């Protein structure tokens, strides 16, 4: 069985997560489910990045210890992932003892190999980002990541010899055009960072102590990136007693990250792995941001959208579908409640929900709830079946590029085509004319198309897939390969009408509800 290892960033548990973090996690979850459905042995890691000054300060504000503070947020994060039915295999916390031990070993190994050395650091320090910046990196004198002011600071610190990896990294980009996607981000890394040359990277701190201690110099704590990035291998047991998963799943097939941390994943991470003689990940995908009011969401600006109220009102499948269909994965996109509700109405209620409900109703009404036999085929039937069995390949093509939106659009072309087939064949007229042979064929084809749709949507909308199959009376396990074959549904299968899967919404009323939620 071929393996597929996928990760999300490990999020800071400084506050509760919002729709932006949910976006990456839902995408990773769908990709894992997709690979699993295709027969891969897929492994999915997410987690939390718990050390550092920001968390230490946050805990202080809340009159508690850093560990107690992060424990509380991590419990909420796990609750959110369980609410969203996120199928992760490992949740790595940087405070897990096996992670801390492995990071100490990594740090020591790099030091012993001469890849890390001790020196003094002087630079522009951004406290919220916990980052030192060089003069040239500042944007209008401010932190290039968050735009806030920095101040000059100096401390004794350990450095990783990042500068020496410049040429190796340039070669990595040259030899592996697919290493960083989308393409535009690659140009940014190569032209803005690598071509200008790299400075050695400060990898320890003495100004705070909420972190993993440098084992041979405990005044120092390991500074964010060696600690955080190593999670992708420690989550698999690297450096621990049981590293079976590391042997089985590393290297990662794809690290999904937001565009602001692409640099850390495509410059620092590969350089660290090179220094450790560890194989590099196959691909890093830097997706766009979900904006609100055309601005990046941030708690301090008060423009944060949380997923919980949306899920409670409309369910997880509608929410996941919207996230993956509405936004083009590589680019930024704005979230609005109107767009969300409109898509629910058009794609889910009018297209998919309506197709299921009218199909099951007609099979009940015209054939006593039994899937009929095909007996009189026409050209229009072949055109539907040809389209239906061709969709899976198109979805595979788009999923290969992590283009969730176009993948879903291909599935919806079939949903809409099938609805149109109802309007064109007019089963109610066939019934009136007592054209039983033709009516049976039409009802069969509608049900069969829905069977294929139920497989195609499974990675993205598991509950809806299950419900469609339940209503169609299908008891077999959904297999991806069965979406490429027509006429697998057995005649005589008893359908079972259920609730409307996506009720049509009164947008004005729902907007009021959502704004109050
Ligand atoms: O950066 N739109 O953690 P973090 C889309 N701990 N995605 C968003 C988003 C938005 N508006 N906001 C957040 C860290 N994200 C580090 C990572 S990895 C070794 C260490 C998602 O809590 C997106 O994936 O700030 C982004 O990269 C991540 O959350 C940042 O999470």
Image: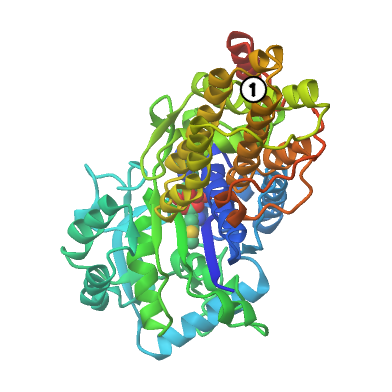
Q: How many marks?
A: 1
Compared across the picture, whether 182 is left or right of 99 comes to left
Q: Quadrant of residue 425?
A: top right
Helix, strand or loop under label 1: helix
Residue 374, given in percent of the width and then of the height, sits at 67, 37
User: Vertically, is 130 above or below 115?
Assistant: above
User: Vertically, is 127 above or below 175?
Assistant: above
Which residue: 45% across, 40% down? 405
Q: Quadrant of residue 173?
A: bottom left
In what quadrant of the picture does the N terminus appear?
bottom right
Q: Nearer the viewer, residue 150 or 113?
A: 113
| CA neighbours of label 1 inside 10 A, class few (<14), some (14 to 19), many (20+) | some
Compared across the picture, whether 471 is left or right of 228 comes to right
Residue 494 appears in the picture as rendered: yes
User: How was this image coloured?
Assistant: rainbow
Q: Nearer the viewer, residue 292 or 175?
A: 175
Q: Quadrant of residue 136?
A: bottom left
Residue 47 appears in the picture as rendered: no
Q: Residue furthest bottom?
A: 112
Residue 395, given in percent of the width and then of the height, sits at 47, 48
In what quadrant of the picture does the C terminus appear?
top right
Residue 420, given in percent of the width and then of the height, sits at 52, 23
User: Vertically, is 378 above or below 263?
Assistant: above
User: Vertically, is 70 above or below 267?
Assistant: above
Residue 126, given in percent of the width and then of the height, sits at 37, 51
Which residue: 24% across, 45% down? 139
Q: Which residue is mark 1?
A: 354
Q: Nearer the viewer, residue 194 or 174?
A: 174
Which residue: 57% across, 34% down? 377
Compared across the picture, whether 225 is left or right of 475 comes to left
């Amino acid at each position: 069985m071929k393996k597929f290892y996928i990760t999300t960033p490990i999020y800071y548990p400084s506050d509760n997560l919002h729709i932006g973090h949910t976006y990456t996690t839902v995408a990773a979850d769908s990709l894992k489910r997709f690979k699993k459905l295709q027969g891969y042995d897929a492994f999915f890691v997410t987690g939390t990045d718990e050390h550092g000054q920001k968390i230490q300060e946050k805990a202080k504000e809340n009159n508690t210890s850093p560990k107690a503070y992060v424990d509380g947020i991590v419990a909420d994060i796990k609750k959110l992932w369980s609410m969203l039915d996120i199928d992760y295999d490992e949740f790595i916390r940087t405070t897990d003892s096996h992670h801390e031990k492995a990071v100490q070993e990594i740090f020591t190994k790099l030091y012993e190999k001469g890849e890390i050395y001790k020196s003094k650091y002087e630079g522009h320090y951004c406290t919220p980002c916990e980052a030192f910046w060089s003069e040239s990196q500042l944007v209008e004198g401010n932190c290039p990541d968050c735009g806030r002011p920095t101040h000059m600071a100096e401390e004794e610190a350990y450095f990783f010899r990042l500068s020496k990896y410049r040429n190796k990294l340039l070669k990595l980009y040259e030899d592996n055009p697919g290493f960083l996607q989308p393409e535009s981000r690659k140009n940014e890394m190569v032209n803005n960072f690598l071509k200008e040359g790299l400075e050695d990277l400060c990898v320890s701190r003495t100004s705070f102590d909420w972190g993993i201690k440098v084992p041979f110099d405990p005044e120092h704590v390991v500074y964010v990136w060696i600690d955080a990035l190593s999670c992708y291998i420690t989550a698999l047991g690297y450096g621990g007693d049981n590293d079976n998963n590391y042997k089985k799943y590393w290297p990662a097939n794809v690290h999904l990250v937001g565009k602001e941390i692409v640099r850390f994943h495509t410059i620092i991470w590969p350089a660290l792995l090179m220094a450790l003689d560890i194989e590099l990940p196959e691909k890093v995908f830097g997706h766009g941001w979900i904006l609100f009011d055309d601005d990046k969401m941030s708690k301090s600006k008060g423009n944060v959208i949380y997923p919980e109220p949306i899920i409670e009102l409309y369910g997880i499948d509608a929410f996941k579908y919207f996230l993956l269909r509405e936004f083009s994965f590589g680019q930024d996109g704005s979230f609005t409640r109107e767009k969300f509700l409109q898509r629910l109405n058009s794609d889910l209620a009018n297209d998919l929900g309506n197709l299921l409900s009218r199909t099951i109703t007609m099979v009940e009404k015209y054939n006593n709830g039994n899937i009929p036999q095909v007996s009189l085929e026409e050209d229009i039937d072949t055109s539907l079946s040809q389209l239906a069995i061709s969709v899976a390949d198109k979805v595979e093509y788009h999923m290969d590029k992590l283009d969730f939106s176009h993948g879903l659009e291909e599935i919806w072309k079939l949903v809409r085509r099938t609805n149109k087939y109802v309007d064109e064949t007019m089963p109610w007229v066939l019934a009136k004319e007592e054209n039983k042979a033709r009516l049976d064929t039409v009802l069969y084809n509608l049900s069969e198309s829905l069977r294929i749709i139920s497989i195609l949507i499974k990675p993205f909308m598991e509950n809806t897939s299950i419900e469609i199959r339940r209503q169609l009376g299908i008891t077999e396990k959904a297999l991806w390969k069965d979406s490429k074959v027509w006429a697998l549904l057995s005649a005589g299968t008893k359908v079972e009408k259920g609730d409307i899967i996506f009720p049509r919404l009164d947008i004005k009323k729902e907007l009021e509800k959502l704004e109050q939620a």
